[in-house]
Image (cartoon, rainbow, N blue to C red):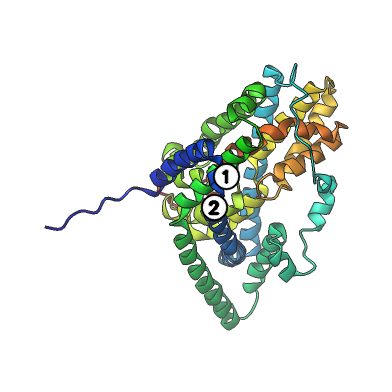
Amino acid sequence: MVQKRFSLALHWQILIMLVLGGLFGYFFPNLTRYTNWMGEVFLRGLNMVIVPLIFCSVATGVANVGTAENLGRLGLKTLGYYVLSTFIAIVIGFILVQLLKPGVGADLGLTVPVEDISTGKESFGQTLINIVPTNIIKSMAEAHMLSIIFFAILSGFFITRVGEKSRVVLLDVLNAILDVIMKITLFIIMFTPLGVFSILAKVISQQILIGNQVSEIIGSMGIYFLTVLLGLVIQGLVTLPLLVRVLGRANPMKHLKNMTTVILTAFSTSSSNATLPLTMETVENKSGVSNKIASFTLPLGATINMNGTALYECVAVMFIAQAYGIDLTMGQQIIVVFTALLAAIGSAGIPMAGLVMMAVVLNAVGLPLEGIGLVLAVDRLLDMFRTVINVYSDTCGAVIIARSEGEELRV
């Protein structure tokens, strides 16, 4: 008689290790230095495959799209969804911050020193110029995602413009590399539960060791924390499912269930880019989106589609204004909304990048940059939640675009 092996689904493994990691970091903060290496190795593994994955997937995706007309149509649909979903997220945050007024009576003594935000002063125009790389090898080495995506789109487009023999060889090589990268990615994903345990334990222990009890931080910044969290919940459980249902004509609850592992990984890593390999694999294999659509929309989304970050930036800036007792005019409030939209598009898919982009929004309406210190105390915790919305929105976009192209999905 053959005994049946007990197997626990990956998302349950991740959830269990999330809880255990949080408890370990809270009760044994001094011991996390012995487990930090697991999280670092896990993130290094994910980062190792990101650049070749993005280049090969985008280039082959664009080459498979074919004509300039098809590429333009797909690009406009994708960017249209990103702008729409991000704008709705900002409006939700704007309405909530006006209703709940989290900054009124806030404790200005609870601040954290602000460092390294000078890069936030780079203009949006300069961000667009920087998309064109001066040295693509350097851009790949430094993981400048927008430059890599731009070069990959050009490469994929012009692969379709060369002779038949060269086109077939180039596509075969890129697809072969992509197959290998996906195999490596699946191998790394096997270690997600250990990485998640280590990362969350480190985050919690850092707060404990610097004297910040998590409950005290949330308590003193409670209304602000809940305002951002409520906005993210509305965006994730109301807005995005409605968009999937109405625009994508798909089952949003089934898609949400398919994305469980992706959501838990995004929560623990706080990085859209680090989650990207798993996101692509899951969207294709569970929700049934074609590689052509997934390889074009998801790498682009991980870089410029930041629903959660945009909502957070809008709430944070309005909170800072309220905390300092500064009444913003209607014109300034409109500037906050649209600058948050542009800043979110320029926000890199890495942890804490939203703080850098917040400086852009603060500068736009003349608020003090020191105000960022007010929100730093709870930023690391909120970063985990807003990354979930960033990544989940990317997957919803892939489903919507795929359906608009006439694909039959599993949701």
Q: Cα distance, mark 2 to mark 1?
A: 9 Å
Residue 218: x percent and y percent? 62, 26
Residue 40: quadrant of the picture: bottom right
Check the picture and name the quadrant holding the N terminus.
Answer: bottom left
- Say which of 79 and 58 sits in front: 58
Asked if marks 2 and 1 touch (Cβ < 8 Å), the reply is yes
Taking the spot 58% from the left edge, 37% from the top edge, the residue there is 385
Where is 336 relative to 149, above or below?
above
Residue 381: quadrant of the picture: top right
Where is 226 relative to 117, above or below?
above
Residue type of the residue flagged with mark 2: Gly
- Say which of 164 and 105 sits in front: 105
Residue type of the residue flagged with mark 1: Lys
- The number of callouts visible is 2
Q: Residue furthest front?
A: 30
Residue designated by label 1: 202
Residue 112: x percent and y percent? 75, 34
> 10 Å neighbourhood of mark 1: few (<14), some, or many (≥20)?
many
Check the picture and name the quadrant holding the C terminus.
Answer: top left
Residue 240: x percent and y percent? 55, 36
Taking the spot 50% from the left edge, 51% from the top edge, the residue there is 195
Is 354 left or right of 170, judged from the image as shown?
Answer: right
Give the mark, 2 or 1, whose residue is nearer the N terminus: 2
- Residue 1 visible to an observer of this rendering: yes
- Residue 250 visible to an observer of this rendering: no
SS at mark 2 in the image: helix
Residue 74: quadrant of the picture: bottom right
Residue designated by label 2: 39
SS at mark 1 in the image: helix
